[in-house]
Image: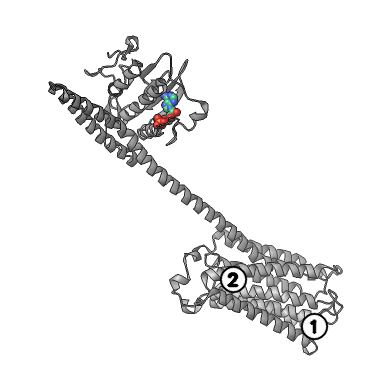
Amino acid sequence: MLNTDAAIVPVEQHFILSSLPPSRAQRRLAVAVVLALLFAFAITEGPLSTIQLGRIDHFVPIYATAMFLTDSITAVLLFAQFSMLRSRALLAIASGYLYTALIVIPWMLTFPDVFSPNGLLGAGLQSTSWLYTLWHAGFAMFVIAYALSKDNDPARRLWRGSAAVAILLSVAMTAAIVCAVAYIVTAGDALLPRINLDPLHFSTLWQFIASCLALWSALAVILLWIRQRSVLDLWLMVVMSAYVIEICLIAFPIPARFSFGWYAGRFYGLISSSLLLFVLLYEITILYAQLLRAVLAQRREREARLMTGDAVSATIAHEVKQPLAGMVTNADAGLNWLDRSKPDLDQAKAAFRQIVADGHRAAAVIESIRAIFKKDARNRTSLDINELIGEALALTRGDLQRHRIAVQTEPNAELPQVRGDRIQLQQVLLNLIANAIDSMATKDGARVLCVRSEAHDGGGVMVSVADTGTGIGSQDLERLFNPLFTTKSGGMGMGLSICRSIIEAHGGRLWVVPNKPEGTVFQFLLLAEVSTASRREQPDNFHLVRASESTGIADGS
Ligand code: ADP
């Protein structure tokens, strides 16, 4: 089945080195590698290269095995890139690497004195050198084919059939070419022009052939240079430059086999063979790291989304529970007043009015929750924090009485105003007081809730809510403010996290310290309103009492 271009060239190509443009750092690195190779060439070239070092028996098999492995792995990686991008150019260069991997085998087998004096495969004196020539000429040809085909229009550039078929065809054709070359060179040894005088020495014809090879490889470099687009082009240029240097080293002056120049040439061969492999492996590692980061980021984002969803629903449930409970209690009370033999309409009206007030409060709470998540600062007004404390204590009076908790309040009459969302800050106080009640409700001994406000040195207002409850274990201190952390069987673990969000959205801080001798103190700091940081009279409806007047409200005062 034919694919459309869009289907053939998916977004992957934006991440693959055969289509990515090289970065400035990569260009610099490539230039540095070529300069290092030239520098090494300048040192090796000349009389040094003709120094005879002697034969190392296992050198040729080890070298050939290394070349076979690096080239075949490179070919596999390039075929893998082809299967994603379907570019014929990639198929050409992958086949080139496969060609060098395969032709190394007959080169090794025909090498004199490695497996037998004249090499295997019935080779003659010339076979190894001709295989070397065709190996390098062939690879350069594949690179030239790559350079020429990579910029074609999409219709010709892309392989439209199955990638597996293309790869199988390429592998089969390349293997066939290598077999044909090996056969011609070994069977036709006697007919080939003489490159070797004896197993160690070369004729001057070798210099002519090597010059042609060097020019052929240089042509590949030039074509790559002209059509340079991608990271792959850049590193293939470096590979072909190493080819040119290698060929020059083993032809000018002509070194004998196993001379310094000959060994140095093999070293360049190994570099040119492994260079692209290193680049591909590096790219795969980077891509893998990017993939890992992307997967982790995606997972974090999903968790955060779930968390936000959980947090929103838990917050709404948590905050609306209180006014709803109030409405149910007042509705019950109202019905009781009406159910009497002589209904008390005034009391019933009062209960219903309370229901209306609770209904409004629930609506306001929901609105303020939206404001927390939207970080909406529109509802902020100038507030007297002592007034808020009084309101919160009045709203929790029933619970405080039920659990026989004494309340101490220490309002500071000289507090500056703060700017904030009344409903949100009231929720903070209600949550902290509700937690304090919970922590004292299960405990024997003195039950005292102390709510203080004071002017802070830095110009802010600090409020403390202290209880004589169970206190907080050091193991829980760290996660206390985490959403959904709770130690209560029916708890939601949202109260403190909401409190912290609200206070921090107001530019303040909320923290916890142990109370002495027992219990916990939650403290929060809010910034004072700049323009009203002056002293104020207490409002008329101010109903907190000074510490000295500390009262127990359990008795209904
Ligand atoms: P919840 O009240 O639903 O558990 P919170 O976020 O309000 O959620 O509180 C989280 C936890 O912090 C509580 O379960 C409790 O263990 C601990 N905590 C909060 N306030 C106090 C307090 N005043 N004394 C002791 N523990 C407290």
- Answer few, some or many: residues within 10 Å of disc 1's Cα (few below 14, many 20 plus, some between 14 and 19): many
Q: Which numbered mark, 2 or 1, is in the foreground of this view?
A: 2
Q: Earlier in the sequence, mark 2 or mark 1?
A: 2
Q: Residue at x 36, y 35 (%)?
A: 505
Give 440 or 151, whichever is nearer the viewer: 440
* Numbered circle sitting on residue 126: 1
Could you say where residue 487 lies in the image, as x and y percent from the top left? 45, 30
Q: Amino acid at mark 1?
A: Gln
Q: Is residue 123 left or right of residue 357?
A: right
Image-quadrant location for residue 110: bottom right
Name the side, left or right, on which 438 lies relative to 254. left
Residue 138, image quadrant: bottom right
Q: Secondary structure at mark 2?
A: helix
- In the displayed structure, 400 sits above or below 81; it is above
Give the amino acid at mark 2.
Answer: Phe
Residue 390 to residue 483: above or below: above
Q: Give coordinates of residue 239: x percent, y percent.
A: 65, 69
The relative height of residue 497 versus residue 293 in the rendered view (above or below) is above
Query: Which label sits on residue 79?
Result: 2
Question: How would you rate the neighbour count of disc 2 (Cα within 10 Å): few for under 14, some for 14-19, many for 20 or more?
Answer: many
